[in-house]
Amino acid sequence: MNAVEIRDLTVAYDENPVLWDVDLDIPMSTLFAIIGPNGAGKSTLIKAALDLIPRAAGTVRILGKPYREVRKKVGYVPQRGSVDWDFPTDALDVVLMGTYGRLGWIRKPGRAEHELAMHCLETVGMADFAHRQISQLSGGQQQRVFLARALAQEAELYFMDEPFAGVDATTERAIIDVLRELRAKGKTVVAVHHDLESAPTYFDRVALLNVRMIATGDFETAFTQENLVKTYGGRIAVLAK
Amino acid sequence: MNLFHELLFDYTLRNVALGCMILGTVSGVLGSFAVLRRQGLLGDALAHAALPGVCFAFILTGLKTPIALLIGAALSGWIGMLSINQILKRSRIDSGAALGTILTVFFGFGVVLLTVIQKSYAGKQAGLDKFLFGQAAGLVAEQVLTMAILSIIALTVVVLLFKEFKVISFDPEFAQSISIPTHVVANMLSALLLISIVVGLNTVGVVLMSAMLVGPAAAARQWTNSLKKMLLIAASIGTISGLTGALISVLGTKIPTGPVIVIVLSLIVLLSVLFGSARGVVWESLRRRKRRFVEGQR
Amino acid sequence: MSVVLGIALVAVATSSACALCGVFLVLRRLAMMADAISHSILPGLVAGYVLAQGPNLLTGFVGAAASGLLTVVLVEALTKSRRVKEDAAIGIVFPALFALGVFLVTKFFDNLHLDADAILFGVIEYSPFDEFKLGSLMLGPKSFWVMLGLFVVNAMFMTTFFKELKVSTFDPELSKALGFSPSLIHYSLMALVAVTTVGAFSAVGAILAVALIIVPAVTASLLTYRLKQMVAISLVIGATCGLVGFWLATLVDVSISGMIATTLGAVFLLVFLFAPNRGVVAQIIRRRRQSARFLAEMLAVHLDSHEGTSDEDEESRIGHLITEMEWAEPQADAAIATSTNLGWIVQTGDRLQLTSEGRRIAQSVRNR
């Protein structure tokens, strides 16, 4: 069974398609990168998979089932810029939100949840900042808090929207360590990624996306000069030395 | 001691003080969520949009059943909110313009109904003005009781759904991904906001309602970085301004209560922005000056 | 001069003066500042009257403009301190100033007719009885001349600084680079809003003044993208609604200012629903029409991307549209019918196949 199976996915905003008839299989226990230029529909692909936006056509199966049936096994790291970091809360509290999906209505996080959240903060190297107001964290630290929140979801499959965007070297190393640890535990990670150079070392498989699926598979077969030119147009010249 | 005695045993003063304190508490809590969700001006718009509902309720039931007026106010505020949402969803009109349009048009329509009432019910509508422009001094025990019951309901919901309200206010997209029905929860928050507006209408009136919602939240935010504490502090600030305003206006002067409460509240906001322990402007500039001084020494 | 003509003149002059400020305010996404300013001019107005020891027009205007600008300064200061966000800053500043105004009124003008009702609703009904006299000549309502004057001032400002207003509204950075200080223009515009509101508010009340500033401009923005047209449409809507509202109000004998606001609302609703391009109905019709074509396009792209692959046979089955593309049956039927009519596909048994035209369409829509 694949972790994610997407068939014939088309997504349109006001009849302007941002994804055209995309097919994608993501095997279990892989670190999977979705790569493409700005406006290629990378975030849209993730959001459509998570039922956050409506689909014009197509099916998405996650762990063999529709999303709503397996949502407790799926973790999500949105783009860091999507929230107001001035919100009155601290790092630990944000991580605790990862347990809300399991808790259900009204029940409040208890000691077990607090311990789990602390553990997740430790995993990303942020335990010392547990009670720091989130606006006082650096961009990389904020990203690690978001990652810890996803870990607290204790999912089988993680969707991450640009986890490496604008982070410092320490954070980048911390994140990649966490991803590898997740893979070792048999989990699957699907991440939107924009750095072509680091992609082959960080990830196992790749999808090149530009509104439609250009190529997908392991780096050997899919991440070729020809496919990159198809994905990025002429702009790739500098990058592909 | 005398003041304390009067507060407990003077009928008018007790009602006014209690009413204003209840309003301060509930609007402090729900205003906090509105401010955090960048809906600081929604309360102002909904308070104005409540007018036609109040008038219709009056035309249908008269003044005999005050609860009908409250329900009318809430319903028409709700319709105002739906209209704002539709405008934002179906056009490129920005939120300020949408709020302004609904606010003025609903209020204008309410004024039309008001003149209809004045014509047909001459003399009997005296209580209606109070309802709109707030006359805390005229609060009676029955009204205070209604306010208390509504507020307890609203605050209980906040306590029960605190976690849901927090996550949709901070990160609605994540909330939706963990299957919290974001729209439903957001609508519940708006409904509670409407309850606090309805509670405020006959105390401080339409115009000053905005301050009752925004003021305590803006002040409380400067003293803490925790949402729970922010809600508690906002409730306290609302309560204290309500009490102080009621005391000053009933005892000292003939100035209407609403404006006094808002002036007290505004001073608290100003002091909080300057000296708030979490984010006060003064502390930051002192720190900066000290740093500059230390660097100069080197 | 007859009472009816007097009121009509006041209504037209007021709505025109207001509509002019409104366009730039709405385009700058500052509509709620009009609401804030309309309330917060109260303390300045009262202070002006206190200084002149009575309702003096000039000191009133100066005071009101000053407190209007004070609102803008306070909101900016709070926002820039990054302690309070802009909407919350507006939401606290104007009630504070309004409360201060009410305080001043009760302190100094308890006997004067300056109560909250009149401030909020206005009493345009009385305006004809306060006539402008020149010697023994009766020249019509004072409010009319005041609003006409304000209209001229606004119009002169807008025409003189049209270019600067336009640039600073759409591209503040460019405006700065060109040497037009955006903040100077911002404050001038706000001063005009304040002064116009003071003029309007003694005639039609604070809330209607705001309605007259915001609603015509918002409505016009649904009808055109061109700035000059937007100004013209706002003026027409403002003046027409002023007259129609007045006429309706006398017909059923209700508040004139309330009826004008209601009429503005009705016109807004009509335009919101039926505007030629951006109206709700036009959107629905367009979506209907497009969605049949869009379904056909999706089908073409789908067939094209699987043509020549090993799973082509399975992917081109009609049943597949329902199971894998998750289309409801009517959607699938519509897609097939439209595509067949357009000559994009041919159907053999339960298999669909692209024609050369269909292939061309698929490639062109995919690359657009």
Image: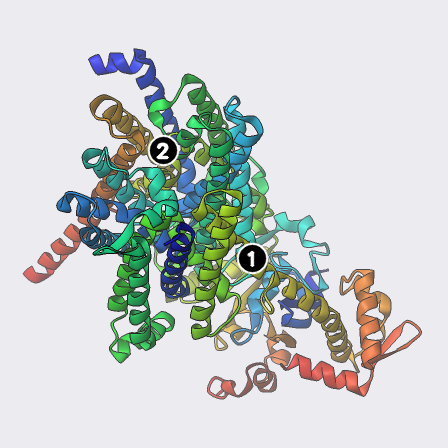
Report whether residue A228 is seen. Answer: yes
Residue sitting at x 34%, y 48% = C127
Comparing C368 with C221, the one in front is C221
In the rendered structure, the residue with mark 2 lies on which chain? B
Task: Answer with mark 1 or mark 2, whichever residue precedes in sequence.
Answer: 1
Q: Which mark is residue A76?
A: none
Q: Which mark is residue B204?
A: 2
Compared with residue B202, is residue A196 higher up or lower down, i.e. above or below?
below
Q: Which mark is residue B89?
A: 1
The residue at the far left in this view is: B297
The span from disc 1 to disc 2 (Cα, nearest Å) is 32 Å
Comparing B76 with B114, the one in front is B114
In the rendered structure, the residue with mark 1 lies on which chain? B
Residue sitting at x 77%, y 64% = C324
Secondary structure under tag 1 reads helix
Secondary structure under tag 2 reads loop
Is there CB contact under 8 Å for labels 1 and 2? no
